[in-house]
Structure formats: C-alpha cells, structure tokens
Image (cartoon, rainbow, N blue to C red):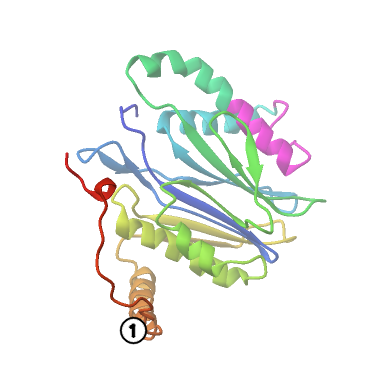
Amino acid sequence: MNHPKRPMTYCLGILVNEGLVLAADSRTNAGVDYISSYRKLFDFSRRGERVILLCTSGNLSITQGVLHNLVQDIKGQREPNLHSLPTLHDVARYIGEQIRKLQETERRWLEKDNIDFQCNFLLGGQIQGEAPGLFLIYSQGNCIEATAETPFLQIGETKYGKPILDRTLSVDSSLNAVAKCALLSIDSTMRSNLSVGPPVNMTMYYADTLQVRHRAQFQAGDPYLLKMRKHWEVALREASAKMPDISWNQEEAPLTLGIADLDVS
C-alpha cells in the first residue's frame, strides 16, 4: 500500500511499576477517499521467557516489511532474532537495524513518487532477568526509553491524546487505571481526528509474570467504549461547571495607541 500521504494512526505504550499497557487503533488513512483498517499491535512473546509487544505507525509497506523480516528471522532461527537477544534494549536496536535495511532498499523508489517512507515502532515487554521496559524506535533506527519521569510513549497522531496522559498518569498508577487512561486517550483522539479509528487493540501486562493474560479489541459502537465516552463527557461538563470563578483583576483603563501599534498596511 503505497500512497503519497503517510498513513496515520495512534499508538501508545505506558510503563508503570505494576507493568505495561500498549494500545493502538487500526485505521490507515491515505486521503479521504482511501480509508482502511490494519492491525498495528503485535505479540511476539514466548510464555515464561519473554514478553515482546510491538506497535507500528507510518508507511504501511515499510512496517509490514519489517514485521515480515522479524517473523522470518524467528522461523529460520537466524541470529539475531526477537527470541534470542538477551535484553530489551538489544531487541530495540535490532528492530532499528531492520528498519534501516528495508528503507535503504525501498527509499529510491518511494522518493521517486514523493511517498513518505518514515515509520516508528513502540516496543514494550520484559525479558527474564531484567525489568520491564518500553522503547520508541524511530525511523532512523535509533531509540529512546520510557522513564519514571516520562512513563508513556506515543507514535502517530499524538497531540489529542497527550493531555489526558499528562494529567492522570504516574509510575504509581494501578495497571487497571492505566488501561482505562490509555483507552480514553485513544477515544479522545478518534473523536478529534478522522485519521484515527477503530477497532482498538489493547494489551495489559503485569510485571514479572512473563505472559500476557489481558487482551481486548474494541469495535466501533462497543458497549464499554460508549459507556466510557459518556461517563467522561459528563464528568468533564460537571468539573467545568464546578471550577472556581475567574478573578477579573484589572481595572478599566483608557486605550492608548502609539504609531507603532497601528496597522496601516
């Protein structure tokens, strides 16, 4: 799927003391006349040994190509692969290398038609013997890691869902609260941007269990999604109505203008 406009999406990962939540929408938008759905959240875990969860955004042909290569490396037992690397940081670097390799192969042809070949990955999980982690892997192949000060990472259409995360999250938040916050962040983004849409896929992972026990998919019109949306809208209206009145703290003064203030163009 190569279109001049970059497919948009919204994915996020949240890392707290109790564990990890990853969530992603499924919409691919290459213009108002071409909207389709592709899964953006993938599970490469091996129960009891490692949890590896990936979210993707950006050029669909590049992200699908990278995912295909990751699968083939596992099936062919090539070194390295997602199941052989000793740390999550090593996994992030390995995925970055796969992105660079594929982009170098495809770049020339995509640039000829002005197709944006950029993409990003979120990697979350845990490998036995180390703590859970969350990484954002950039299109250039480099990566950053979530920290206690910044416990969430986003890719795609991030701006609409970020204020909710900024105001509600901390590393001490319960994992159930984190999951609701993640879903609310995606729902708020869907409400404000048509390039983000259902179904929404979400996983919740409890630290040190080394298996993903909680998965969910929310279609458009899902009863829980509708209930959550209504609850949030009512709560916002009530909170807004109960805010303290504004203190109007300036006295009326005559307006004075200088020549520099006048627009004479």
Q: Residue at x 37, y 68 (%)?
A: 225
Q: Determine the image quadrant of residue 246.
A: bottom left
**Residue wearing tag 1:** 241
Where residue 22 sits: x, y (%)? 55, 55
Any part of residue 42 in sight: yes
- In this rendering, the answer to whether 110 lies above or below 135 is above
Q: Residue at x 44, y 50 (%)?
A: 158
Where residue 25 sits: x, y (%)? 41, 52
- Tell me where the magenta segment starts and ends, as one range: 78-98
The kind of secondary structure element at disc 1 is helix
Q: Residue at x 58, y 33 (%)?
A: 71
Q: Residue at x 53, y 22 (%)?
A: 102
- In this rendering, the answer to whether 119 lies above or below 169 is above
- In this rendering, the answer to whether 50 lies above or below 211 is above
Reply yes or no: does residue 82 show up in magenta.
yes
Where residue 35 sits: x, y (%)? 27, 42
Q: Amino acid at mark 1?
A: Ala
Quadrant the N terminus occupies: top left
Where residue 52 sits: x, y (%)? 64, 47
Residue 230 shown left or right of residue 173 in the figure:
left
Q: Determine the image quadrant of residue 174.
A: bottom right
Q: Which residue is more in the foreground, 198 or 14?
A: 14
Q: Which residue is more in the foreground, 242 or 232?
A: 242
